[in-house]
Amino acid sequence: CPCGGVLTRFNPHNLANTAWAFASLRIRNDELMRALAKRAVTGFMGSTGILEGFNSQEVANIAWSFATLEFDHPQLMQAIAGKVMQDGAVASFKAQGIANLVWALVRLQATTPELMAHLAARLKEPGFLATFNAQGIANVAWAFAKVGHLDEDLMALMAWMLLQPSTIPSLGPQDVANIAWAFAKLDIRNEVLMHALSERVRAPGFLRACNSHGRAISNIIWAFAHLDIHDMDLMEAVKDHLLRDRVLNTFTPQALANTAWAFGRLEIKDWALMTAIAERLLDHGFLEEFTEKEIASVAWAYARLEIRDQLLISALTTCMADHRRLSTFGPRSLANVAWALATLQVKNEALMWDIADRMLHWDMFQDIKAQELVNVAWAFASLHMNDPGLMQALATRAVDPAFLSTFTAQGLSNFAWSFATLQVRNEYLMAQLADRAMVHDVLASFGAQHLAMTAWAFARLDVHHETLLDALAGRALEVVGEFNPKSIAIIVWAFAQLRHRHEALFTHLAQWTLDSDALSSFDSRIVAQMASAYAFLDVNHQGLMRGIVHRIAQGDFMHTFSEEDLADTQWAFATLGMNQEAELMAQWQETLYGHNPHAEEPAANSY
């Protein structure tokens, strides 16, 4: 490698062209690359660096060359960034040059927010993006998304350019993937653009051209799933392609994991495809190539689709049982795996205890998100596995004011449910959850199920919070039409257990039960719970109680009652002074069980 004599005589044009030639041929010579960078930045003995003499095309070429060969030279890239930031420098860049420059700087992690904003300003100049080809726009979109720099005006302008009649048809597999991925990564849901990309993917021959770009296919459908765009025509076309000619065998672990995740996220349960993915995953040694995030994504996808593939589950759990492998798992991956195991009711105690131990590592709670925290708690509760240390750590993290402010209604209700299910009574936690639930915007987002679960949790733990219960009741009155039989029974049971009489709520729930004919779908347990709760709080809704009598008398429904439930129902009628109905209950009980015990107040119980 000529590091002294020849290179000292190189001018900017020679230097940029040499780098470009080696990069175009994909020939990486580290000694040469270091020498080229030195000539550009500092120069050799007796000479000075010549970067200041580079024109815009030469700057773009040398940056592109180093990025293409994945040769990171921080000093050179910082110098290039500094040159671009000079007054007026960026204005001299043409379309191809700036597209290559942005891509290269991002690829080598040499950007700053100020630099990206500076480049965005140039890209938004009137008419400038119109000089770009489709690939250039795709690369720029990818670059801005890669560093998470959201410029909504720029992205809207790029979308508009991409939607021009001649642009979409010219996009290749990698271009479509880069564009879709970029908009998804920045959480920009441009349905018109995504529909156009879908049409391009479904064009004759496009998916076949993707065979050497498995990652492109997976990134495209990942983007649609991330944006929650249910394009069934696209997903069907992709599925058919993946099942043809063993295409899945060409997929990398990341591509396969993203594909499974996308179908899981969109809840598209295609047995043939998921079976084929599982078979590919089970190829000898293939799972060993997966990262922790990819393993977690696969587990999450199959759980989301409720596909209990025993061989795959066994392979995944065996893979994760390796402590060295599990030690690489971050909080999100641990949460997804725990959630998946619980959802599929796979009670692998050894693995779950290992997950608990890993979660208690000092750095786990620094980056954990609220949903991940909730999923961990929910998973252990669903499997009825109580690790006191873990639950205390989860509670401690949850009550941090800044962290608690990120809890949604669903997260809050699930978290409370988890502690209640495991009978972990933490009054300070419950008080903080109550305060969060009563925040106006949070309370307004509670649905019937969230209300019922939250009330149930407080009742199960015998935590009395009158203000919260009134707030939950007020919200329940607003969404009474969302309640189903189970959620009705749960919330009235909870209020009864906490001895909180809210007549308006009970009256409206009773009326909704009658008006919606929900009573006809009540099972015997719910009937008994409803009757007992109304009686316990002395809310005598004659219409509901008579409706319960008619429900019990329907067909063979009476025969589904346990002796205890029938006795509880009899007690409810007697307590409410409905003696005729109570006597009828007694007669039915004697007919069914041969005796009529003295009606007593039901024992405390729960769902």
Image (cartoon, rainbow, N blue to C red):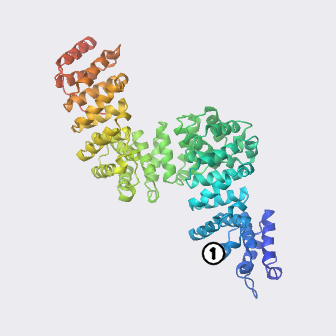
The three-letter code of the residue at mark 1 reads Met
Of residues 387 and 475, the one drawn nearer to the viewer in this rendering: 475
Residue 240 visible somewhere in the drawing: yes
**Left or right for 324, reference 371:** right
Of residues 208 and 425, the one drawn nearer to the viewer in this rendering: 208
Q: Residue at x 78, y 73 (%)?
A: 16
Which image quadrant is residue 211 in? top right
Residue 222 visible somewhere in the drawing: no
Classify the position of the N terminus by image quarter.
bottom right
In the figure, 509 relative to 285: above or below?
Answer: above
In the figure, 275 relative to 21: above or below?
Answer: above
Percent coordinates x, y for residue 333 in the rendering: 52, 50
Percent coordinates x, y for residue 338 in the rendering: 48, 44
In the figure, 166 relative to 482: above or below?
Answer: below
Classify the position of the C terminus by image quarter.
top left
Of residues 391 and 462, the one drawn nearer to the viewer in this rendering: 462
Percent coordinates x, y for residue 3 in the rendering: 79, 79
Q: Residue furthest front?
A: 126
Total number of numbered discs in the rendering:
1
Near mark 1 (Cα within 10 A), the count class, few <14, some 14-19 or many ≥20, is some
Which image quadrant is residue 95 in? bottom right
Percent coordinates x, y for residue 63 in the rendering: 71, 69
Q: Residue furthest bottom?
A: 46
Of residues 40 and 87, the one drawn nearer to the viewer in this rendering: 87
Q: Residue furthest right?
A: 6
Task: Residue under label 1, please give it.
Answer: 85
Q: Residue at x 52, y 39 (%)?
A: 304
Label 1 secondary element: loop
Q: Residue at x 40, y 49 (%)?
A: 408
**Left or right for 484, reference 170:** left
